[in-house]
Image (cartoon, rainbow, N blue to C red):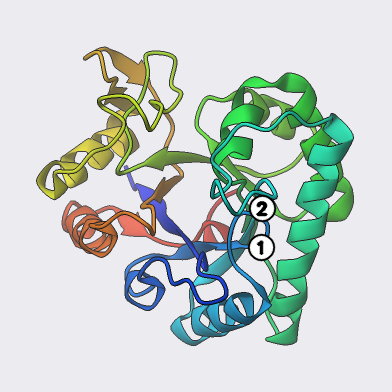
Amino acid sequence: MKYIVDLNSDIGESFGAYKMGMDDEIMKYVTSVNIACGFHAGDPMVMDLTVKMAKELNVSIGAHPGFPDLMGFGRRKISITPKEAANYIIYQTGAISAFAKFYGLKLQHMKMHGGLYNMVCGDETLATAIVEAMARYDENLILLVLSKSIIVDIACKKGLRVACEVFADRGYNDDGTLVNRALPGAFITDENIVVDRIKRMIIESKVKSVNGKDIDILAHSVCVHGDNQKAVLFAKNLKEGLQKEGIEISPLKEWLK
C-alpha cells in the first residue's frame, strides 16, 4: 500500500522588532506552511517576506489565523461569538490571500492557531460558523484541522476538503485532544522517537496517549511547530526518516481528495 503525507510548520510569527522561529531553515524540509496573519503574530512585512520565501522554495502556503492576542501569542482562551469567530477567520485569510495573489500564488489551506484551534475542536457552534464562512469565502480551500475533532465531520458534510493534522512534537490525551502546554507530557522532546511515532500514526492510524492508551488517529499532515527549539532537527529527521520507510512526502493539494 502506498502512503503519502504532508509535512507542515507554523511560520511567519515574527513581528516588528521581534524575531521568532527559523523559517528559512525549516522551509527546506516541509511541504506546506501555515503563515501567521497579524493577529497572534506576524505583520505585513513578515507576511510579504514569508510568502516570497515559500514561493522561492516551492512550498505550499496556508492561512494561519488566530485570536487578536499578541501578548498571549494567541494561545489564551478568549470568549467569542460565532460571528466574531467567522469574521476573524475571513479577515486574516483575506490578508494573507492578498500577499499570495501579489506573488502569483493561491492559498492551499487554512489552519487555525493556538487557542482558537483548540476551542473549535470541541465547540460545534463555533466550528459550524467557521466552516460556513470558509465555504462561502473559498470552497476550494483545504481545512487543516485536528484529527478526529468535531470540525472534521462538520466540514466534510459541507463538502469541503479536510486534512487531518497530527503533531510530531505534542502529546495526546485519551480523547485525542492535545495535552495542555502547562501539563507534563505536553511535549515530545526526543527527536529519536519522532519518526517511529509518526510512522505508526500514518500506517497504523494509532498513537499512544499521555496515559499509555492506544487511540485512533488519522494523519494527512504532520505539524512541526516552528517555535520548537528542535523544530529544524525534527523536520529534517521526519522527512528523511519517513522517506526511508517508503512514505511519500507531498503537499496536500497534490493528492488530497
Within 10 angstroms of label 1, few (less than 14), some, or many (20 or more) residues? many
Q: What is the secondary structure assignment of the residue under circle 1?
A: loop
- Looking at the picture, how far across and down is residue 200, in whole percent? 25, 34
Q: Which mark is residue 37?
A: 1
Q: What is the secondary structure assignment of the residue under circle 2?
A: loop
- Looking at the picture, how far across and down is residue 225, in whole percent? 38, 53
Please give left or right for residue 220 compared with residue 119 in the image: left
Quadrant in which the N terminus appears: top left
Position of 24 relative to 210 (above/below): below
Please give left or right for residue 72 compared with residue 194 in the image: right
Residues at marks 2 and 1 touching, judged by CB atoms closer than 8 Å: yes
Position of 240 relative to 130 (above/below): below
**Residue drawn at 21 percent across, 14 percent down:** 212
- Looking at the picture, how far across and down is residue 52, in whole percent? 57, 85
Residue at mark 2 to residue at mark 1: CA–CA distance: 6 Å
Decide which of 59, 26 is in the foreground and name it.
Answer: 26
**Residue drawn at 56 percent across, 83 percent down:** 49
Please give left or right for residue 61 compared with residue 7 in the image: right
What residue is pinned by disc 2? Answer: 65
Decide which of 3, 201 is in the foreground and name it.
Answer: 201
**Residue drawn at 70 percent across, 33 percent down:** 156
Amino acid type assigned to the residue bearing label 1 in the image: Cys
Q: Quadrant of residue 194?
A: top left
Q: Earlier in the sequence, mark 2 or mark 1?
A: 1
Please give left or right for residue 6 compared with residue 132 in the image: left
Position of 176 relative to 115 (above/below): above
